[in-house]
Amino acid sequence: MARPSWRERIQTARGLREAASRRRVRRVVEHREGAHCELDGRRLLNFCGNDYLGLSQHFAVVGALQDAASREGAGGLGSHLVCGHHALHDALEKELADWLGTPRALLFGSGFLANLAVIQALLGDEDICVQDRLNHASLIDAARLAGCRLRRYPHNDPEGAIRQLRSMPAGLAMLATDGVFSMDGDLAPLRELAVVARVQKALLYVDDAHGVGVVGPDGRGCVAAANLGVREAPLQLATLGKALGGYGAAVLGDDELIGHLAETARPYIYTTALPPAQAAASLAAVKLARTEHWRREKLTELVGHFRHRAKAAGLVLLPSDTPIQPLLVGDDARALSMAATLESRGFWVAPIRPPTVPEGRARLRITLSALHTPADIDGLVNMLQFARDRAEAEARMARINAGTPA
């Protein structure tokens, strides 16, 4: 049998994605200003970003980045264990650890890298990693690359988690979960999962990328909201690119575990450190997130206003009290159609389709920011109604043209 051509395989895969309305196209943002951005020469109100607290363009954050870059340059120069660990990195790690109430923090270039590092450094082929079925792709990929046994339990089901842990009693065990689930916007039942982890002698690891800055007392995230400490949740991840508006991530927790990661985690050892200027920007953002509580209060009010208006308009949202507000659509083509209608009327909302979400669960992933106003929310809800009605009319017409009952 002849060896297949890689080009033919790529073209076949692309054709299948096209037929299933699952092509992914990169868009070019030409300019950002507050909650708006310019896309293809058009000004759009952005409802698909992760700048939850509106800090990415704050003058103190941008000023810190500019000042540090003018003094320290643009790059990190080397890995943290060679010559790349700067005083600004050290200050940011200490600030994050103090904020989240942990002994130590360790910076990474991204949340994806951090998850690869944690699971690769702690688990091997004799061990098991039990995960929520809706965990972020980076946690799933990390377990696969670590070579450990990956077992997944039904979403937010502690009993399912304990069954999976009991299936492999030997070896080390990790129970890993998102804190806020990035496509559904709901929270993990961390108190119950902490009990499961304790009973099964498993390490609880919480990827709180979408929780830190937004959820819990003083924005300290899902672990703090569940009133858990380092004993119950020895490791957690906080990203710098969501509520904090920058780039990078940190793993926080038990001092001995963090020290082990710093010495053994390949994605930490063999990569260049974040630019010191980026660390300076994130340090400024953390200080703002810790003190400007009005940002979270406004965000909470906007979430409540959006859900109230959406319910009155007959829009079916998934249950979520976070800035991630998914509108379940179901059909991939309908999600694309609604997103296109919204964009044509000045609103940018992301259509999310499989494999990012399960089959039949395509949705519009609406995200809110402290930069939005109640009037922005009202305009979005009105346009969501219009896009829904237009998509339903298109679907009826398609059925009529196909000779099927309307």
Image (tube, rainbow, N blue to C red):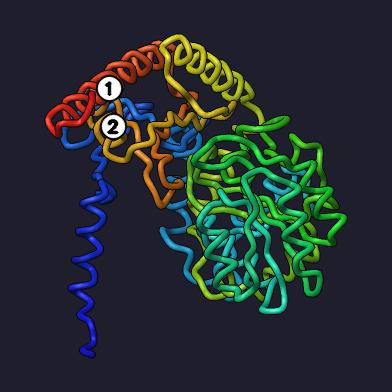
Is there any visible trace of residue 397 in the rendered image? yes
Contact, mark 1 vs mark 2 (Cβ under 8 Å): yes
Quarter of the image with the N terminus in it: bottom left
Kindly state the secondary structure of the residue where label 2 is placed. Answer: helix
**Residue at far left of view:** 401
Is residue 336 placed above or below 374 in the rendered structure? below
Is there any visible trace of residue 91 in the rendered image? no
Query: Measuring 43% from the left and 45% from the top, which residue is drawn there?
Result: 66
Residue 405 shows which numbered tag? Answer: none
Query: Measuring 42% from the left and 34% from the top, which residue is drawn there?
Result: 365
What is the three-letter code of the residue carrying label 1?
Answer: Ala
Residue holding disc 1: 387
What is the three-letter code of the residue carrying label 2?
Answer: Ala
- Looking at the image, is mark 1 or mark 2 earlier in the sequence? 2
Query: Measuring 64% from the left and 37% from the top, which residue is drawn there?
Result: 187
Whole-number angstrom distance, CA of label 1 to CA of label 2: 8 Å
